[in-house]
Image (cartoon, helix red, strand yellow):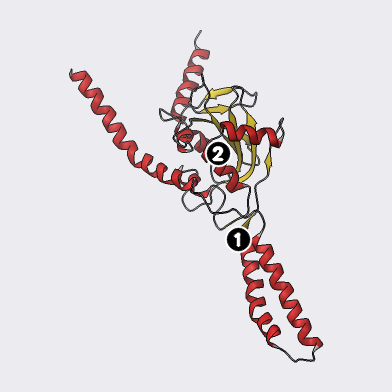
Amino acid sequence: AAAAAAATARRGAALRARRPLMQKEDGVRAGLVTEVPFEVRFSIGNVISVSGFVLLAYSLGSFLLKNGQSDLVQTLGFVYAIPALVGGLALKYAELPPVPLTQPGSSAAEMEALRESKGTKIQTKILSDATRFTYGDAHMEEPLRALKLAPKGQGVPVLQSLSESRTPAGGYALSMVFYAPNTPYRVWKDRMAGPDGGRIARFFGDGKKSLRAWVRLVSVKERTVELTIATLEEGEEDTALELLKDGSFAPILTAAAEEEAAEAAAKAAASP
């Protein structure tokens, strides 16, 4: 009885320790799936700056052709053209272009059908947000900061590309390649390792369909990392994994666990 009470107390303490993080993750997760009335698939900065330039050119040309005489249309043109041009250029400065999307080994129509039948709402929202023009925050900035993948005072990893694929079990996988000059690969692994190894998968889950996640070091020189979130199919586990260079998967261990394993291997190799 005493042992059972102690085990219950330990589980309660663990849940209380994790509750603030879970609440924070729930809040960010809710923000990720916020619906918008419509999505703009063109550059607003281009439209405003070009229209402002055309209106300014028309007003200035008309003013010169009339030997300096102006009318109401020209006056209104000058009044609205200059702010429109400046505002459009400011939007262009803050504009983030869509992230390129590929479907290796499949057609866009096949991946769209798989996404609609297997993908989660979060996966669809990430894809939608990253493949349109945005202004201000970087792509995926809020969830990356919530997952502590950006050091304090440093920028978040930059989302460079997206790819869709079908998993061996028939699920839908969304892979994201990040340029992460300020976030070492060890940090990515630490955020997925340990007894709460499915944290990233649960973070991006929508409560209806379960996800699994794995990470891959794309290039040390270019400091790029690939994070994949895939639907969890029957027979699969949500344990966080690392995709190795040879294409195999390995469970992610904490830095301390890796050091212990390396020491044990070294001792075993040294023993006669």
In the picture, measured across the screen, residue 247 lies left or right of residue 57, that is: left
**Quarter of the rendering occupied by the N terminus:** top left
Distance from Cα at disc 2 to Cα at disc 1: 25 Å
From the image, tell me which residue sits under label 1. 94
Q: Nearer the viewer, mark 2 or mark 1?
A: 2
Characterize the local packing of mark 1: few (<14), some (14-19) or many (20 or more) Cα atoms within 10 angstroms. Answer: some
Rendered residue at 65%/47% (across/down): 99
Choose top left, top right, bottom left or bottom right for residue 194.
top left
Q: Amino acid at mark 2?
A: Gln
In the picture, measured across the screen, residue 17 lies left or right of residue 190, that is: left
For label 2, the SS is: helix
The relative height of residue 115 versus residue 55 in the rendered view (above or below) is: above
User: Which of 76 and 98 lies nearest the eye of the viewer?
Assistant: 76
Rendered residue at 62%/64% (across/down): 91
From the image, tell me which residue sits under label 2. 123
Rendered residue at 71%/84% (across/down): 74
In the image, residue 66 lies at what x, y percent?
79, 89
Query: Would residue 216 be seen by someone viewing this image from the given angle?
Result: no
